[in-house]
Amino acid sequence: MGHTSLEKIIALQRNPANIRNLCILAHVDHGKTTLADCLVASNGIISNRLAGKLRYLDSREDEQIRGITMKSSAISLLYAIGEKEYLLNLIDSPGHVDFSSEVSTAVRLCDGAIVVIDAVEGVCPQTQVVLRQAWLENIRPVLVVNKMDRLITELKLTSQEAYIHLQKILEQVNAVTGTLFTSKVLEERAEKEKEEKEEKESEASGGDQVYDWSAGLEETDDSHLYFSPDQGNVVFASAIDGWDSGMAQFAHIYSQRMGIRAEVLLKTLWGDFYLNAKAKKIMKGAQAKGKKPLFVQLVLDNIWSLYDAVVTRRDKEKVEKMVTSLGVKLMARDSRHSDPKVLLSAICSQWLPVSQAVLSMVCEKLPSPLDMAAERVEKLMSVGARRFDSLPKETQELKQAFLQCSSEENAPVIVFVSKMFAVDTKALPQNKQRPLTQEEIAQRRELARQRHADRLAANQQAENQDGHTHLGSMSQETQSVGDNTEIPLPICSRPPAFEDEGTKETFVAFARVYSGVVKRGQRMFVLGPKFDPTQALSMLSEGCSASDALPAVPHLSCCSMESLYLLMGRELEGLEEVPSGNILGIGGLEECVLKSATLSTSPACPPFTPLNFEAAAIVRVAIEPKHPSEMPKLVHGMRLLNQADPCAEVLIQETGEHVLVTAGEVHLQRCLDDLRDRFAKIEISASKPIIPFRETVVRPPKVDMVNEEVGKQQKVAIIHQVKEEVSQGRLSDTLHVDSSGLVTLTTPNRLATVAVRAIPLPQDVTRLLEDSSELIRTLEQLNMSLREGRRIDVSPRTLEAITELKSQLESLLQGRKWRNTVERIWAFGPRRYGPNILLNSVEGYHRPSVWQCLVKGERSGEAPVVRDFDNSIVSGFQLATLSGPMCEEPLMGVCFSVEQWDIQSSSEPQHQDSVEEDSASHEASGDGTSTAEGTSETSAQAEGITAGPSQAKRRTEAGSVDCYGPVSGQLIAAMKDACRHAFQAQPQRLMAAMYTCEIMATAEVLGRVYGVLGKREGRVLHEEMKEGTDMFIIKAILPVAESFGFADEIRKRTSGLASPQLVFSHWEVISSDPYWVPTTEEEYLHFGEKADSANQALKYMNAVRRRKGLYVEEKIVEHAEKQRTLSKNK
Ligand SMILES: Nc1nc2c(ncn2[C@@H]2O[C@H](COP(=O)(O)OP(=O)(O)OP(=O)(O)O)[C@@H](O)[C@H]2O)c(=O)[nH]1
Ligand SMILES: [Mg+2]
């Protein structure tokens, strides 16, 4: 606990105005944990000497070995400025992309963040990501520019150059913030304008309005958002050497020395100001007059000369002079140490201790839990598409509780759990060997003494040996008491139940109290992500609590707070209660919370919006136990792992494989280690990573493989091929493929026919659909509820986003082929929100469009009706898009246009009416004949099929029993097959997942980096030199399939000088056709008969097919006779 007692922390927890909940965010290796060390050392938890080397918050063994943080961990620190004492709940987060979900869980619980930037590397990809995350969660950041020592010792910049370099870094960061800010203001502005416009329209007042986009930007004050040392939200530091250059300290020092007021200095220290030595005045325009800026003269020069004296020249005399002038006291062993860095950090940590400036900046600039913005509360409370003011009254009232952050007895308790983490059961405070307090020691001593006296009296004889068995350490005690000195007593108390517990993992919830006081043993509601307060309020009686016997409400359960903990890095401390505004650990929730949850005493509380994870889980492996009999242990272990990691997913595939999905290679490694050593405790074997692919169709290529234009003749040849395949198939009598790729398929009972064509979607459309998948999912939910007759109050922002998506699609789908397409979209798939489209091109079938939620008002009488079995068509489409014909991977970027759909009758009488009704309505709309005609044409050969509704009716009445099963099922299968065949009638391609990677490398190793990239089919997008350094930044694209071991290889080949970060970026079509065979003479000449040497797509496809146990068309022994000729004596 360092030199802060638990009682003190508990007392501080009651004063939310002096609490700061903050996290440290940065790109990987920019020095977050090192900085945290300095802050932790300020509380005496670790020694100053070890700060920066210990990396105290990296408590896992693999974190220490690898040198990167993998889990975010929290610690409570005390900081005092003058009279005021602050409690800082600090969370250190990982910077590696693979663990960005840990960052999300940390950011959610905080009100502010320290963003750390490496002074040499500047703004890196993850820096932008964390700034965005902080922005999205509405938390306020402050900046620490770390590793300033590298500017001096590595880059060897002069102080003046360093100043310019730092200015550039600040510009970069502010540019990122600026972009975030502008987009938000414009969005809000647009919303406001829209509302105003709607109001005006309802008042029926006209008048032109000139729309001025910039107005919103000019009106809004954004100055507080930007980072600038004169705002007091930037500190320049070197965490490893333990110093920083806080403006306030320097202003304080120089105001005394120069007789200039500290406030003036604070305002002018950073910026284009210089010191006029003669006039003793601060003047503007340093740059124009070629003067040294004030910051360089007063701050950087001093630091530079210290480094120069201590590290570069090792000038003992000068050092001594400086030490005395700074008033620093040095220990002899520091000044004699052979490593100058030791001396340097000894001087710096006293002169400019890093914790001082950083912590005072945090206390002054970051908001307390009391300052939570109303906007943030509404964002937390309004889940999905629902608008805040559509929530029930009781729920809206809870907003006040958030804002007040009250710890009153009657305040509702609201807690959010952002993740569950596993700790060794032994490490829990109740099981820990606790040092005895003074009183306990005295008590025990007294007891022992008494026993000793008793024993002496009772057993004067020598045979008293046996009597000592009841206390383990008795013989020792006897001796010590005998010579009447200190009694060595067991220094720890240990609960008796402990021994048989073994090494078990216990789950602790990482949480924050937003309102009320959480007490140990209290019962609370656990609100699942789909919990609906409106529904719950109607089902539960007023004033009910979680300890009552309650009716079953969907997504609501109850739990009790078994134990509460103060998080102290590696340690936990037991607490009895935790008031509002604090971060805490809760034990005993593993049964009711999987990864995250909202807990409350009020059923009116809505579940918090889900955490937004930046990284997609993409690397999957299948896991098996080494010994098959240990399967149950593995299953149990995987379940625990799933709970303990915010982003790892554990699935059991249809094939029975246990699959682990992780965010990247490093994450995968950590999950496997955890599974092996902590959760399953068995030997496991993991398959090679399963690489995801997508299947798509493309337009027929214009040139062949030898770059010759494809002639008409050849196209015919391709079609012939398709036809041939079809005629060989079983389904040939019900399946028909025409020359344009239209596939017509009839169900086995010959009652329904569908004709489908597959069309490749333009790339931009696919990307748009992919990016909007969340929105499409919401759209689908809205449609679903509309179909069920429920209306949800949708937030205007969601509606606007849907309208925007629609208009974007309209503008991208231009041209004759796509006329009116957007209106005719039937469904998206797979899973109803994927990047494929089902299009309704059936003549005379006007079904409600997917955009129906945009249509305001009641539905009119002549609204389009949904035909029977509409759902079967959609299901068939969903199935077809979920796994394609190439290697059963999902489809992407394919539009299936249903051009004809005839259904004549169903064996279920209840559908009869609607069939009739349908036909009637078609007739009424003028083109009713098309259905009947179409049917009789396409299924003319089918026996017993009659056209026209009346005949169909007769047939059903006759009670024909369909031996092929229900019509809906047949239709699903037929639709799926039709889609698959339509897909195959087009040129098919595989799509590969691509990573982007940014590699920073010096000029010497640049060539090697390119070498590795080239070997792995990477493409360099651009390369630039980082200003002011000798580093190059290379941005490249790399297929995921080729990425395994990439980071390691790069590191090895460049002796650790370059390390890439891989982030999933997009899907890309592999240009080669996996089914390609040479057809022209040139191609034969060029590629040979087999032509599989260069076909990467075929290799990928076969690998997937082999893994899935599908048929692979490959000869195992190709040239058998040649093997004989290989003998040596030939
Ligand atoms: N020269 C120099 N090196 C530093 C400084 N601060 C940290 N480092 C070094 O940078 C490396 C990374 O430091 P960490 O604190 O582990 O970085 P991190 O941001 O916590 O990294 P992740 O948690 O993995 O994202 C370590 O080798 C540190 O010694 C500094 O001020 N100057
Ligand atoms: Mg770290």
Image (tube, grey):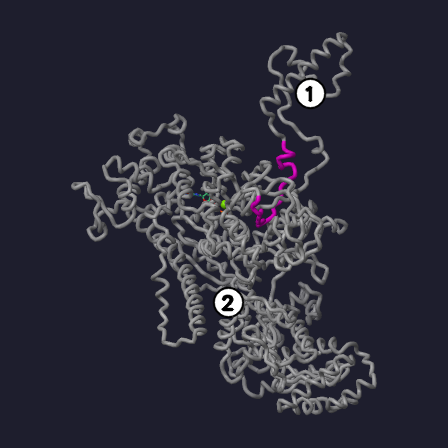
Q: Amino acid at mark 2?
A: Pro
Stretch of the chain drawn in magenta: 410-432
* Residue 171 vertical position relative to residue 211 in the rendered view, above or below: above
Which of the numbered marks, if any, corresponds to residue 796?
Answer: 2
Q: Residue at x 45, y 35 (%)?
A: 42
Q: Find out if the beta carbon at label 2 lies less than 8 Å from the nearest ligand 1 atom.
A: no
Residue 46, percent from left and from top: 49, 34
For the residues marked 1 and 2, what is the alpha-carbon distance in whole angstroms? 73 Å
Q: Residue at x 45, y 50 (%)?
A: 1057
Residue 184: image quadrant is bottom left
Q: Secondary structure at mark 2?
A: helix
Residue 435, percent from left and from top: 60, 27
Residue 694, percent from left and from top: 60, 68
Residue 604 vs residue 942: left or right?
left
Q: Indicate which label's residue lies in the foreground, 1 or 2.
A: 2
Q: Residue at x 73, y 12 (%)?
A: 455
Q: Amino acid at mark 1?
A: Ser
**Residue beneath label 1, please?**
473
Residue 411 in the magenta stretch? The answer is: yes
Determine if residue 458 is in view. yes
Task: Tell me how many marks there are.
Answer: 2
Name the residue at the left extreme.
Answer: 278
Q: Kindly indicate whether the residue at mark 2 contacts the one at mark 1 (C-beta within 8 angstroms).
A: no
Q: Find out if the beta carbon at label 1 lies less than 8 Å from the nearest ligand 2 atom.
A: no
* Residue 533 vertical position relative to residue 727 in the rendered view, above or below: above
Residue 612 in the magenta stretch? The answer is: no
Residue 426: image quadrant is top right
For the C terminus, the image quarter is bottom right
Q: Earlier in the sequence, mark 1 or mark 2?
A: 1
Residue 917, percent from left and from top: 70, 85
Name the residue at the top extreme.
Answer: 460
